[in-house]
Image (tube, rainbow, N blue to C red):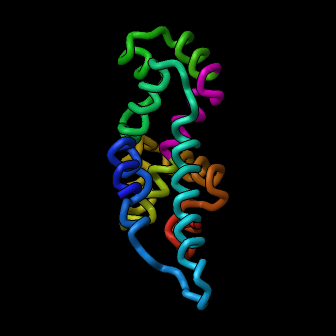
Amino acid sequence: NIIASVYDKFGWLGNFIDIHFFESVDFIHEGKPDTFMNFYCRKITFLLDVLKKFQPNITDDSIRTICEYILNNSEEDLKLKVIAEKFYLNNTYLSNTFAAKAHIHFNNYVTMVKMARAEYLFINTTLKTYEVGYRIGYHDINYFSKLFKKQHGKSPAEYRSTTYDNYQI
């Protein structure tokens, strides 16, 4: 119920973590009573870290709204100019205000969100690398692969071929 409530409040979470990730019980019981509790606490901590990473404590309502828009529309064109026009802001003002209020540069935030969406797509679909890149707005596969490797430490092919415990808890 707690997880479902969090997903209701932060609807964008489903773009990055499948809710079934929290329902699955994929741990080895070692005969210790705290094993399941520790296992699930790691999952809850992971969820809190994701929330903190993507929705930092921002007091400015317009910047918080822009962050939520980016999180809800991670496969759209999220260039600074496009977002500034959508929210009736000046490009320079948005860039400076975003960096000051969110403590991350606008383009770095968008890249982080898009690479997290790519990670989700690699884990939960069979889309090819170029299809994932194209879907999240990168038409140059080499550039996409470079960004992904910078963010995750592995190329898309290496990432996909590695067996992950759904998000590396």
Residue in the picture at 36% in, 18% down: 86
The N terminus lies in quadrant: bottom left
Residue in the picture at 43% in, 30% down: 78
Q: Please identify the dominant SS of the magenta region.
A: helix
* Marker count (numbered): 0
Residue in the picture at 42% in, 25% down: 65
Specify whether 121 is left or right of 99: left
Figure check: 65 above or below 54: above
Specify whether 80 is left or right of 30: left
Q: Position of residue 117 (x, y in %)?
A: 45, 50
Q: Position of residue 126 (x, y in %)?
A: 36, 67
Q: Is residue 92 magenta?
A: no
Query: Can you tell which quarter of the image residue 20 is in?
Result: bottom left
Q: Position of residue 12 (x, y in %)?
A: 38, 43
Figure check: 77 above or below 145: above
Q: Looking at the image, which is closer to me, 90 or 17?
A: 17
Q: From this viewpoint, which residue is outermost toward the bottom? A: 31
Q: Looking at the image, which is closer to me, 55 or 75?
A: 55
The C terminus lies in quadrant: bottom right
Q: Position of residue 22 (x, y in %)?
A: 43, 65
Q: Looking at the image, which is closer to me, 38 or 88?
A: 38
Residue in the picture at 53% in, 15% down: 94
Query: Can you tell which quarter of the image residue 137 is in?
Result: top left
Specify whether 117 is left or right of 31: left
The region drawn magenta spans 100-114
